[in-house]
Image: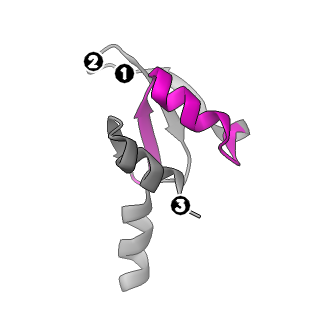
């Protein structure tokens, strides 16, 4: 099963992150992806101070940081 990060990449969604948290821009495609997300109860949203758009904050879902930690 693919992670939410991998699915977001495949869909070409706008992705940002802070440390382990994955940020996805609020779009209809993102909402559709999150609808079936196993841990959606932990997802929050915020307005970015950079672009003034709504984004979803998905805790601990930014795969590259975890992959880097396990390579050590």
Residue with the mark numbered 3: 2
Q: Which residue shows up at 70% across the image and 48% down it? A: 38
Q: Which residue shows up at 43% across the image and 81% down it? A: 70
Q: Nearer the viewer, residue 18 or 58?
A: 58
Q: Disc 2, disc 3: CB below 8 Å?
A: no
Kindly report which numbered mark, 2 or 3, lies closer to the viewer in this rendering.
3
Label ID, residue 59: none
Q: Element under label 3?
A: loop
Q: Residue furthest left?
A: 50
Where residue 43 appears, as percent x and y from the top left, is: 62, 36
Kindly report which numbered mark, 3 or 1, lies closer to the viewer in this rendering.
3
Q: Is residue 34 inside the magenta stretch?
A: yes
Going by the image, does 38 lie left or right of 12?
right
From which residue to which does the magenta span run? 19-40
On screen, residue 17 above or below 34: below
Label ID, residue 48: 1
Label ID, residue 51: 2
Q: Quadrant of the N terminus?
A: bottom right
Q: Earlier in the sequence, mark 3 or mark 1?
A: 3
Q: Disc 2, disc 1: CB below 8 Å?
A: yes
Residue 21 visible in image: yes
Q: Element under label 1?
A: loop
């Amino acid at each position: 099963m693919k992670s939410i990060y991998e699915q977001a990449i495949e869909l070409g969604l706008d992705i940002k992150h802070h440390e382990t948290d994955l940020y996805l821009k609020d779009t209809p495609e993102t909402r559709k992806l999150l609808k079936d997300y196993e841990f959606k109860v932990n997802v929050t949203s915020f307005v970015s101070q950079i672009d003034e758009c709504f984004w979803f904050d998905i805790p601990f879902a930014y795969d590259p940081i975890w992959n880097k930690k396990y390579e050590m």
